[in-house]
Image: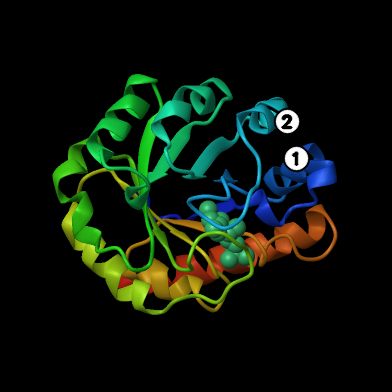
Amino acid sequence: MNRKTLIAPSVLSADFSRLGEEVEDIVGAGADWVHLDVMDGHFVPNITFGPQVIKSIRNRTEAIFDCHLMIAPADDYLGAFADAGCDFITVHAEAGAHLDRSLQTIRNLGKKAGVSLNPSTAETVIEYVLDRLDLVLLMTVNPGFGGQAFIPSVVEKTRRLKALIGNRPIHIEIDGGVTPETAPLVAAAGADVLVAGSAIFRGNGKVAYAHNIAAIRSAADNARQYEAA
Ligand code: DX5
Ligand code: ZN
């Protein structure tokens, strides 16, 4: 996997009344991916947006759309999120009984397939679907809200996941409570994609966002170099 850390701002912390401009601003500020948190008020205790909103901002950028589905069931909606222009579609292992089938469906739609694990879910649930995965997202908060505190036990879990993945081309993404202080912990443990909402959408517009993205990126990249040395 590429050594450079990819930064995926979560639009959950954006100004939704200006979502299109916010997406342009974070990409202009150096974001690698755009992280889209879809919540259903059932799998998680919050509701955000669906495929129609994603489709409406798709033409604002060519950046990767990284769609994190916190919905149950997910299978019935995978086609709609593919049509909306998502590049990665990630389902929660806890959201359905047939993870293998969900991942096959995503790949058959021509999209990159991801699985997300809540903090209390063991990393070993991916052992028999490794060949179907492009990304594993480890939650470092309980999903549902931005601005929560990072759960430190997931650092060791990241290390174990990295060992399980070996040299397969599977991204390890971390989501929740990522800041310049916590980013080095997970980067050194093997994460290569970092999601951040409240730590990036702070201050007003592109200049502030660029500063916030750069702070997380350099903290993470330094930790990875340190690990490699
Ligand atoms: C939480 C979402 C996260 C959230 C992260 O359920 O999956 O993507 O937006 O927000 P921060 O970075 O503020 O913890
Ligand atoms: Zn997310």
The residue shown at (32%, 40%) is 134
Q: How dense is the environment of label 2, judged by Cα within 10 Å: few (below 14), some, or many (20 and up)?
A: some
Does 40 sit above or below residue 4? above
The residue shown at (35%, 78%) is 153
In which quadrant is the C terminus drawn? Answer: bottom left
Residue 209 shown left or right of residue 5 in the figure: right
Residue 151 shown left or right of residue 229 in the figure: right
Where in the figure is residue 11, as x and y percent of width and height? 67, 49
**Which amino acid type is marked by label 2?**
Arg
**Secondary structure category for the residue under label 1:** helix
Where in the figure is residue 73, as x and y percent of width and height? 42, 38
C-beta proximity under 8 Å, tags 1 and 2: yes
**Which amino acid type is marked by label 1?**
Glu
Q: Earlier in the sequence, mark 1 or mark 2?
A: 1
Where in the figure is residue 218, as x and y percent of width and height? 55, 67
Does 53 sit above or below residue 32? above
**Secondary structure category for the residue under label 2:** helix
Q: Is mark 2 within 8 Å of ligand 1?
A: no
Do we see residue 14 in this rendering? yes
Q: Quadrant of ligand 1?
A: bottom right
Where residue 169 sits, quadrant-wise, is top left
Where residue 154 sits, quadrant-wise, is bottom left
Q: CA distance from mark 1 to mark 2?
A: 6 Å
Does 209 sit above or below residue 109? below
The residue shown at (80%, 58%) is 207
Q: Which residue is mark 1?
A: 24
Q: Specify the label residue 60 is tagged with.
A: 2
Where residue 21 sits, quadrant-wise, is top right
